[in-house]
Image (cartoon, coloured by chain):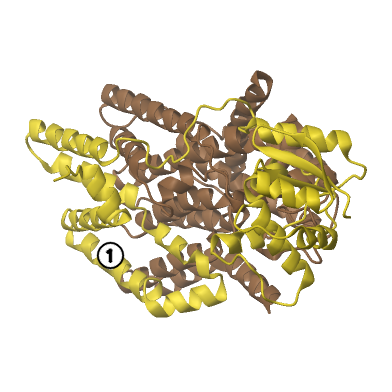
Chain colours: A yellow, B brown
Amino acid sequence: MTTVTVHDAIIYYLGDGFWTILSLISILILLFRQRPSGRIRIILWAFFSVIILYNPISLKVITKAVEPLTYYRFFWILPGGIIITLALISLAYSLSNRFLSGMLVAAFFVFLSQAAVSFVSLPSFEIPSNAYELGNDIFQIEEAISNDKKTDMPVVAMPSPVQMEYRTYDAAVSSAIRKEVYQGMVKKEYTYTGKNKRRKAEYALGALLDGYRLIDSDKARKSLSVLGADYAISPRNGDIYQVLTDAGCVELVTTDSYVIYTCVAN
Amino acid sequence: MADILIRCAFALGILTVLFYFFSVPLEGIFHFKLQYLSERIIYGFFAYFFVFELAALPLIFLKQPFSLLTRVWTAAMLIVVIISLLFIFVKKCGRIILDPQGKPFFSVICILLAAGFVAALMILSVCEKYIGWDPSYYLGTMNTTLLTDTMYQYDGSDGTLEKTINLRYALSAFYMQFTVLCKLLSIPVRPMAWFVMRPLCVMLSGIGVYNIGRTVSGGRTYLSAQLVLIWSVISLFWSGLHTTAYFMLVRGYEAKGYCANVVIPMVLCSCIALLGLRARDEKEQWKRLALVCWASVPVSMSSMAIVPSAVLILMLVLMLVDDKRLSNIIRAFVCVLPNLLIIGVYLLSKI
């Protein structure tokens, strides 16, 4: 039988639920450590929180009036980290025996270290190699386009990882494919069935550049033309390279991970 | 790289000093009772963003050039600093009490440890490489602003000209404030986000938690510092896409990060005090709550509905446990009035 650590249990079985449970236990600890008047106030606060925010009706109202994805932010009103800490300190100081208090705090730290042997909350932790926290590719792409561009704001068709980073470094380009298209692809909507020509071209080209789906070179040429792309950037992939060069794109520069093309189709 | 990092460290330092200067008129004009450095920095931060919003919003909606906002804000900062200096030297405002309350030696040790842990979190946050579509849009907006000398007239993520100003983003001048700093201190946008905005969020979160500690412990310094200490460890290990810790360490350069970790905890700080768990001065706490609420949207649009919800819950609880029902309703209403107006404008724009 495979050994399961506390860390595994939390991450794989409980996930965030573990912290939710710990927060709730902490609220109960704080509740019982209060005087009766304080307890009433905490209970009333919880009661009105449920009535006003944490119920299905409020969920519907908030998601309709504001935005569907913002409802989770209302849970920030319950700052779990602070509540857990307050409960821990309260519990530690309530123990008359100093040794026991110390043990409680030490046990908590050991538990935490088991709970997350790596920096779970820092998914892409890395010592910065440059002040921009950017990989070499973006610098190379920027240099190639800056040296070659004929207009102030060239239109560039980029794969999503490049698009996410590029304009945060250099805003002097316009993206041919809107972020909504790439966000849609994350939701597995690789194709667009509507009548909007521009949107259709964005989906076709986005799917190609992100490697979701190969398209024929005619479609790629039309898409680049509809979007008015001056440049295209693709990962170093033989199939995508073939499609784009057949569509009339000419290789400009190759970086560590990407190929940059000038688009003669436009 | 070293040159940019030095400028970023200078920006962090200058912002902290400016927050102090912005806290002085709160004391001199509005009679806030701010004594401790932690209180001055955090409430100065809210005053700073509130005043910036007043300067920026008209210019954004009149489609004035960004360089004009930079000049206006430079002048405004100078005026506030001069007024603060006058208050400091003439009225003897702006004093900072450094004496730790309760167990002085132990308190100093705890404060140093807590500060060390928060500093470690700040450094760790700098090393986080996360970028998503949201921050890409925000940083793209800042970059576009610097490039085109316009505000919210271009889409931040793709650089196309917007038909109308997008109120979802333009009603809060948070990003324009840091763009002004980019321009004044010649710091590129990405280093500003990584080395100034995110560590600042961590620092202000720590200060906010320290203030909560002071409120619940009746001002005992060592307890407040212990709260910060353990909270910083928990924050490091608390995974999950929507937790406040994640929004501090990973997405701390977004306004949302400030909403989750600075604005809402400070609203709760005032709520805890007002609920009488450790209330000292009711009028003072209402004033503090009002300042945080009024500055909540300037700091983050996410606060638009969350902060009024928290204040509404507070008001309902106070109505049941406190005798001053009418005055509490009026005070709560005054606190959330700007947010309600902004919600109204925002919803009208969606129709």
Query: Can residue A77 be seen at all in this image of the molecule?
Result: yes
Q: Return the x and y of residue B323 as percentages of the image width and height.
A: 34, 71
User: For residue A41, what is the image quadrant?
Assistant: bottom left
Q: Chain of mark 1?
A: A
Count how many numbered circles sit on residues in the image. Answer: 1
Q: Which residue is mark 1?
A: A41
Foreground: B266 or B67? B67
Foreground: A238 or A13? A238
Disc 1 secondary structure class: helix
From this viewpoint, which residue is outermost toward the top? B2
Quadrant of image for the C terminus of chain B: bottom right
Query: Can residue B177 be seen at all in this image of the molecule?
Result: no
Q: Amino acid at mark 1?
A: Arg
Q: Residue at x 70, y 46 (%)?
A: A234
Q: Return the x and y of residue A86 as percentages of the image width and height.
A: 27, 46
Foreground: A65 or A138? A138
Quadrant of image for the N terminus of chain B: top right
From this viewpoint, which residue is outermost toward the right? A150
Q: Return the x and y of residue A180 as percentages of the image width and height.
A: 65, 62
Say left or right for A6 vs A97: right
Foreground: B80 or A91? A91
Say left or right for B344 vs A124: right
The residue carrying pointer 1 sits among few (fewer than 14), some (14 to 19) or many (20 or more) residues within 10 Å by Cα, namely: many
Q: Residue at x 62, y 40 (%)?
A: B22
